[in-house]
Image: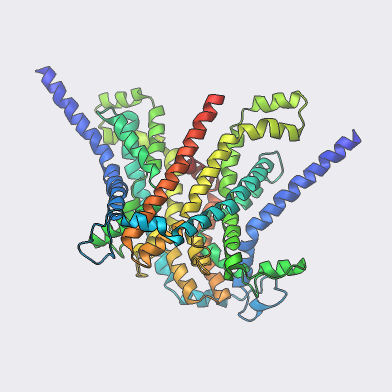
Amino acid sequence: MNRDFALKTLFRVLHYTVLSLAVIVAIFPFYWVVVTSLSTSSHVFDFPPVMVPLWHFHNYVRAWDEAPWARYFFNTVFIAAVTTALVIVTSSLAGFAFGQLRFPGRGALFVLLLSLIMIPNEMLLIPNYVLLKDLNWLNTYQAQIIPYGASVFGIFLLRQFFLSLPVELYEAAAIDGCSRIRYLLKVGMPLAKGPIATIAIYIFLGSWNAFLWPLIVTTSSSVQPIQVGLATFLSAHGTAWTRLSAASVFTTAPIMVLFLILQRQFVEGVSQGAIKA
Amino acid sequence: MPARAARIRRWRENLGSYGFITPAFVILGAFVLFPFLFVIYLSFHHWNLINPNPPWVGFTNYIDLIHSQTFWQSLLLTLYYIAGTVPAQIILALVLALLLSGKIRGLSAFRLGVFSPYVTPVVATTIVWLWIFNPEYGLLNYVLHIFHLPALPWLTSPTYAMPGVMIYSVWHDLGFSIIIYLAGITNLPRDIREAARIDGAGAWQEFWRVTWPLLTPTTFFLVVINSIGAFKVFTQIYTLTGGGPVESTTTTGFYLYQYAFTYFKIGYASTVAVALFIFILILTLVQLFLAERRVHYQ
């Protein structure tokens, strides 16, 4: 009995130790970037390294002045917000149609839609670049928004939701003279709050973290998002570790705060998005 | 004529229904379906983006691709990257997901901790890792120094650049696999695990006889989706190594980018894109096939 107890305690200790170790490895780089960002350009090369913050905030001031960060932030938020809104509109309309309405070719069109997820985004970089170049859309906001304005995952998720909604509800509303679009706006979308939130977070996160596409279609800082701006800053100040770290901190902080507030929805969005997409 | 009126009404209703799906189909048609066909078309041409009449060259690009040493090298490097990241992620994610699915104090804090790297932007976090990997002043070599191990030229040598990228990717992406495993563990039929317990199976036996087999579909899914991700990996290579030194980290996804947007060999790069599509398609089909078989077993 005593041996059992000892074994159990040992397992418990082991359990916590492994988990704590994993968390330390996962978050230590965040701690380290904060420490570096608060160091000075001479102390940063100390050996052994100083492990505690030195509280020199001037790196933040300098880094902030060295690039148009406010512009980058605005661009990122604007692009992510409009893309998310557009995806919600297109997904709600199409998801509602596939889930609640009957029309010829519904099944075939849905299969065609699903088959599109087989096409990897990376394959579309070249042709879409050429297309946008011909449209004179290079270095614009719409180049970063419109191509991502519809999502197969979003349509699929809302279609599943609307399939589970009783058709009687819709028919009753139709008898009362409620048009379909009104029904979708007043009844359907409020009921679909859950899946819409999942889609919104998934798309917003993807848009915020997007890098390759904006790297290709933009060259002007006036429309570039923060990730591309940060990469430009990195190639210009490749060894200024304190300022680079400061920039890394203030560009990551907003998405981290959002993650802390909406953890559950984030996890939901990521797991659903992965399985369906 | 009520029949005719009804028909007209039905017609108008159908037209309205198509209206609902039109916005999504226009966007997906213009920016997914059309470019998909267009890139195949481009792969049969030589083009530098400037020439207004790119010449048709038949299968030349495909033949060049097959004979290109650098292409096969990029493929081998992709496989190397897969071998270095996927098994490590599967094992670590499974262990951590099992530990995180138990009843423990501070569970949500632990979960938050291990997920956080996954939601952070790659460019921003590679900056930290560039600093950690710094051969002279970096933290990693300091840690090696503490353990009396020699310092390594992490991202600056052809031998250690790829392992460096792998370490970064496992660190950044692990949260994703943990989330998926946690979802899989939550969906396990509780009664089977309880029955095993009642039959006197120990924790170890329960894992090997019950949990691991039941999680096989999740594991397959993660192997495939992470391998597909490896073919697409770009941002961390761009910021950590730029594909070097001496192309030692130029995986197929990065190779595609270089040929398209650095060398502007649009036709050849399109052929690489088609090859990439085929590799990913094969992986997807394998996944579907295996998923199907699992269903029949049960």
Is A45 placed above or below B150 here? below
Point out the image quarter for the N terminus of chain A. Answer: top right
**Apparent side of residue A63 relative to residue B18 in the rendered image (left or right):** right
Is A70 placed above or below A255 here? below
Rendering coords of residue B258 (x, y %): 41, 64
Which quadrant of the figure has residue A71? bottom left
Residue plotted at (60% across, 40% down): B182
**Apparent side of residue B183 relative to residue B54 in the rendered image (left or right):** right
Point out the image quarter for the C terminus of chain A. Answer: top left
The residue most toward the left is: B1
Of A166 and B278, which appears nearest the observer?
B278
Of A26 and A266, which appears nearest the observer?
A26
Callout count:
0
Residue plotted at (77% across, 68% down): B148
**Apparent side of residue B70 relative to residue A261 in the rendered image (left or right):** left
Residue plotted at (25% across, 41% down): B22
Rendering coords of residue B176 (x, y %): 55, 48
Can I make out residue A63 in this image?
yes
The residue most toward the right is: A2
Of A266 and B215, which appears nearest the observer?
B215
Rendering coords of residue B165 (x, y %): 57, 61
Of A108 and A98, which appears nearest the observer?
A108
**Apparent side of residue B297 relative to residue A1 in the rendered image (left or right):** left
Residue plotted at (48% across, 48% down): B228
Visual colour scheme: rainbow
Is A170 placed above or below B33 here? above
Rendering coords of residue B94 (x, y %): 64, 43
Can I make out residue A75 in this image?
no
